[in-house]
Amino acid sequence: MKQKGYIFLLILVLVVTACEEPVNWQFPPDSQSILAVDGIITNERKAHSVFLTRTINKPDEAVIPVTGAFVAITDFDNTWILPESSETPGLYLTPPDVQGVNNKNYLLYINDNGIEYTAEASMVPVTPLEPVDIRPSGDGDSLFILFPAESDIPAMKEYLSLIHI
């Protein structure tokens, strides 16, 4: 028992006294700021968002929002022009009644100071996971054993392989 205490103490001392090396980021002086786009459309009926920012040169710099851009999304049946939020610069929102549809293509169009950007994607259906039976292990209140059901669904097979690690 004393050996475990000494090992624990040794590990604790090593963790507490570990050194941290400063990192010097070297960026070329002519690093160009590039448009960064963060957006998603889901199957929820809500105002979906597209957040536009510029890349930064140093990790501790503040994010630079892109304001005044023209942003639109189309599913080739409907087109939504996204106005910029008055509360959050760089945040562009669809109307609140937009809802994504599985297997439908969506095109994002952005015009920022005369430079045009486009992206196209489709929303794919999500495969539901099968239930997993969780039972106490008998070795205490905080230990449990997972008993997943066998499944031929590809997403479920991946999930089961993660459980058995």
Image: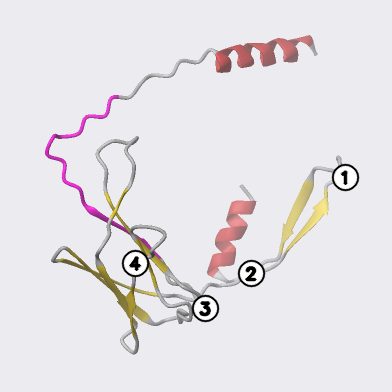
CA distance separating discs 4 and 2: 45 Å
Q: Nearer the viewer, mark 1 or mark 4?
A: 4
Give the x, y percent position of residue 63.
33, 46
Q: Nearer the viewer, residue 96 or 103?
A: 96
What amino acid type should be assigned to the residue bearing mark 1? Gly
Give the x, y percent position of residue 3.
74, 11
Question: Upstream in the sequence, badge 3 or badge 2?
Answer: 3
Q: Residue 45's mark?
A: 3
- Tell me where the magenta segment starts and ends, as one range: 24-39
- The residue under label 1 is 138
What amino acid type should be assigned to the residue bearing mark 3? Arg
Q: Nearer the viewer, mark 3 or mark 2?
A: 3
Question: Upstream in the sequence, badge 1 or badge 2?
Answer: 1
Mark 3 secondary-structure assignment: loop
Give the x, y percent position of residue 119.
27, 69
CA distance separating discs 3 and 4: 19 Å
Give the x, y percent position of residue 44.
53, 75
